[in-house]
Image: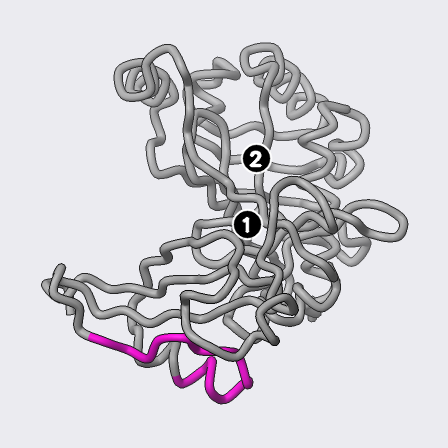
Amino acid sequence: MITRESANHFARSWIAAWNSHNLDRLADHYADDVELASPFIASVGGETSGILRGKDNAKAYWAKALARFPDLHFTLLGCHAGASSIALRYQSILGLTGNEVFFLNAERKITKVAAHYDQPDITVAQKDRQEHYAWLGVSHVTPILNVSNLSDSFVWFEKLGFRKCWDWGDPPSFGSVGAGQIEIFLCHNGQGGRGNLASTGGSKGGDDRDKGVWMSLWVDDVDAVHRRCVDHGLEVTRTPTDEPWGVREMHVRHPDGHVFRMSKGKECM
């Protein structure tokens, strides 16, 4: 069986290998007789079946992909462990979301992988990006929050329902949390400002207190989020309320003064 910890380790290592653009580092995750199935193999690798067999063929395909997309960078969105397989969801090239299922042998090398994308035709994806993102090429936004304690912030976000994605530094000074398909960067004592709650007598009080960044998050169930916040002792500054602008909304505040508006459109309820 694959444990949650080993699946997370695999995910971080695989993502880092791709982002390093080092083919040998990437190939080390795969068995010699690996079988790859991906819709991009046809458009990038030139194999119309979309299937490649053998590590050497895989490396040749990856080399073409990196040459075509020299700024390639993946962001992990989710990791799921199976009995002998691991499924990863990640932000891929051209703003696409990728889902890959990896089957592993006893040595934890990949023997078979099936890749899936929300747009399987890479030519169409490139055309859509040119039409919709124009010259700027923005595919998504990742907020960066200034926090006074990185490890405590990971714990706080996990209580809210986020997962820790990664951290960086020794000791860590930068990190990431994610939920669904969004990611938030956390920076220890840098990159932006934060609320100075101590200057106003502590964190108790309403939203008019000295505060940091405000973020609006759209969720499936505002009341369920509220119950989770209460259960985990998080500071709710506004209980679930049906607002006149057509949403049900609550507010929860991070210890550094960052406020999260958790909202759902009433027409979608």
Residue closest to the far bottom: 231
Badge number at residue 134: none
Determine the residue positioned at 33% across, 20% down: 133
Determine the residue positioned at 58% across, 35% down: 74
**Quadrant of the snapshot with the N terminus:** bottom right
SS under mark 2? strand
**Mark 1 surroundings within 10 Å by alpha-carbon count, few (fewer than 14), some (14 through 19), many (20 or more):** some
Query: Does 165 sit above or below residue 96?
Result: below
Three-letter code for the amino acid on which mark 2 is drawn:
Leu
Determine the residue positioned at 82% across, 51% down: 172
Residue closest to the far front: 200
- Magenta segment includes 8: no
Residue 211 pos. (x, y %): 51, 59
Foreground pick, 174 / 21: 174
Badge number at residue 36: 2
Query: Can the viewer see residue 11 in this picture?
Result: no
Looking at the image, is mark 2 or mark 1 earlier in the sequence? 2
Q: Quadrant of residue 116?
A: top left
Quickly name the residue at label 1: 184
Query: Does 156 sit above or below residue 66?
Result: below
Residue 203 pos. (x, y %): 56, 74
Foreground pick, 132 / 33: 132
Three-letter code for the amino acid on which mark 1 is drawn:
Ile
Give, as a single range, the part of the protein colored magenta.
227-241
Query: Can the viewer see residue 94 in this picture?
Result: yes
Residue 227 pos. (x, y %): 40, 85
Determine the residue positioned at 44% across, 50% down: 181
Foreground pick, 222 / 258: 258
